[in-house]
Image (cartoon, grey):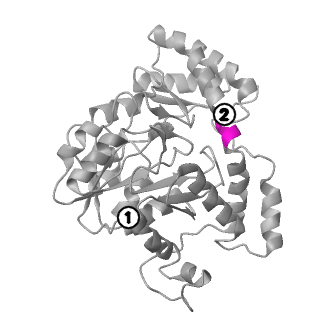
Amino acid sequence: MQTIPFNKPFMTGRELWYIAQAHTNGHLSGDGSFTKRCHGWLEQHTGTARALLTHSCTAALEMAALLAEVEAGDEVIMPSYTFVSTANAFVMRGAVPVFVDIRADTLNIDEDKIEAAITPRTKVILPVHYAGVACEMDTIMDIARRHNLIVIEDAAQGIMSTYKGRALGTIGHMGAYSFHETKNIIAGEGGALLVNDERFAERAEIIREKGTNRSQFFRGQVDKYTWVDVGSSYLPGEVIAAFLWAQMEEADSITARRLALWDAYHAALAPLEAAGKLRRPLVPDGCVHNAHMYYILLDSLEQRGRVIAGLKERGVNSVFHYVPLHSAPAGRLRSRFHGDMAQTDQLSDRLLRLPLWVGLEPEQERVVRALREVL
């Protein structure tokens, strides 16, 4: 019996052809023709003022921290139930992550707990759109306006998702996408920074180009380029951009196929939820998700371990997700949390992610059957 992997990267069939074109063009470093196509696609499909490819979502978040002028002692409000890069990008600037609890329905940051966590040191609110389902952005943006704070969206999982008709990553002042091979639209590694507030756009180019005005030079705006600001090498090479362009061309069909898989899980598992054996994911009104993942919530950590083992025996690889950052060694050392973290602690112990990837269709019923057997 062949094992069903948790994830399997999907290729459209044009990736290698476009990489060969990049080679033929003789431009393999950053900001070549494929990078420009990807920038154009992102700006057209999301409505952001400026999109910039980066070599990872981590890099995009690091750029956002620099653009927000986050400094030692500043505080950044975020959920603890997230990937380490969400916090690390700001810890590297000397900031202190301030964790607040998550909502029981979406596992997103609880917007009603943010305002109480604000102090005179708070500079940024950092919502994370878990599973490609939007946070309650109207409330978050209202809080930010009233307290003069910057909002940076961690939309690593959120490409092709929307909140009240607006693309995730475009609602705050800045947003970050991931194109890691575990995401919907992939390049192996890779990311993008969306700059929605134009006051940050020019400096974003400079920070991304090692602190130089190189982009202005190539546009003919200056007669030579030089070091003008802090920065680093955040560009991906053209091989990454060429691969990504093939994926972007098929973004609609990839999303449609993932949604069909998500919907099939949701329908098949409804009886198990009705019987009290699991809880299915919830998508609030006004949120259009991208089927980034399908997770279930079980009764306990112990039950989750038994289910993972039972599925593995039946040839199905399932996984849990983040260890909450407030409980991690570095989190205990470099961050603090406001209020209790009850939802974060108990939901992280109960969550189980099922395989979901383009091409799973013939085997999906086997996953569902195995889950019914172990429950």
Q: Quadrant of residue 89?
A: bottom left
- Which residue is disc 1 drawn over? 65
Name the residue: 35% across, 61% down: 90
**Dot 1 alpha-carbon crowd within 10 angstroms: few under 14, some 14 to 19, many 20 or more:** many
Is 358 left or right of 331, judged from the image as shown? right
Magenta part of the chain: 252-256
Give coordinates of residue 235: x percent, y percent: 58, 69
As for residue 230 lying within the magenta part, the answer is: no
Q: Which mark is residue 33?
A: none
Q: Main secondary structure of the magenta part?
A: helix
Is 84 left or right of 307, judged from the image as shown? left
Quadrant position of the N terminus in the picture:
top right
Name the residue: 72% across, 43% down: 10
Q: Is residue 278 above or below residue 119?
A: above
- Which residue is disc 2 drawn over? 256
Give coordinates of residue 296: x percent, y percent: 49, 25
In this view, the residue farthest toward the bottom is 223
